[in-house]
Amino acid sequence: MPPLDLSIGLGTSGLDDPETCTETVVAALEAGYRHVDTAQMYDNEAAVGEGIAQSDVDRDDVVVATKVHPENLAPDDVRETTRASLDRLGLDRVDLLYVHWPIRAYDAAATLPAFDDLRDAGVTDHVGVSNFTPGLLREAREILDAPIAAHQVECHPRFRQPALRELAAEFDHRLVGYSPLGRGEMLDDPAILEIAERNDLSPAVVALAWALDRGIVPIPKARGDHVRENLRAVDVDLPDEDLDTIDALEPGDRQIDPDDAAWNR
């Protein structure tokens, strides 16, 4: 199984217009992204796949991740809908397949072996989970034969997920951060703005550079010029005092908090 090399990724949630989605994926790959994240729930896998196909970047150089919808987590549905995802993406495999949310049809003992089956069949190279609590994460590790390669959760300077980051280090998986700009709130956050001005950077780059320095894999959503601008974070080394300032910021609330999320039970 090839190792999972996860770098800053393009998040595609909300890229609902097929043409815009495809153009954004092409632009991201041409700019240097090598990680594209989609999901059955986003209803844009076909447009994402078209962008990958149109790009000049070799398919094997791109980590393509998708997620199984929480309504599709019964074992047979996992297998059937994942293959349908491949058809929409125009691929013979994905690099990373996530459980999107451990809710609704999710039953750890029944759902997770189906992910093992897909990995064994070469449908996915790696298995991941998303929006799990520490307890559910530990349970999944006990059930899965495949190692958990990544855990995707909301993570940004005002919602830093210390417990899950510690578990990622302990269990040797990647912590992938969605909404790394806090649904845009980091762009107007006074503390982030001050650091950005001091370092002649955009606030988005500051937030993403913090994530990368702290071992988080951010997957910002972006369109137009913001796609290339966000990628600047890869080459930014924030001063230690600025990183420490971000680490000490007063925590905020979740931006993504559905009533049936595991942490609300």
Image: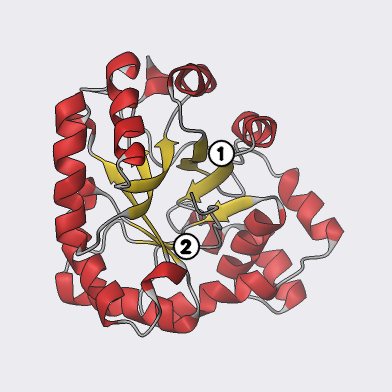
Q: Residues within 10 Å of mark 1 (few under 14, many from 20)?
A: few
**Residue 24 screen position, x and y as percent:** 32, 76
Q: Nearer the viewer, mark 2 or mark 1?
A: 2
Mark-to-mark CA distance, 2 and 1: 24 Å
The mark nearer the N terminus, 2 or 1, is 2
Quarter of the image with the C terminus in it: top left
Dot 2 alpha-carbon crowd within 10 angstroms: few under 14, some 14 to 19, many 20 or more? many
182 on left or right of 174 = left
Q: Which residue is the site of mark 1? A: 252
Q: Residue at x 62, y 35 (%)?
A: 168
Looking at the rendered structure, the kind of residue marked 2 is: Gly
Q: Position of residue 210 (x, y in %)?
A: 68, 57
Query: Circle 2 sits in a helix, a strand or a loop, which is it?
Result: loop
Q: Residue at the spot x=18%, y=47% of the render?
A: 83
The residue singled out by tag 2 in the image is: 9
- Which amino acid is tagged 1? Gly
Could you tell me which secondary element the residue under label 1 belongs to? loop
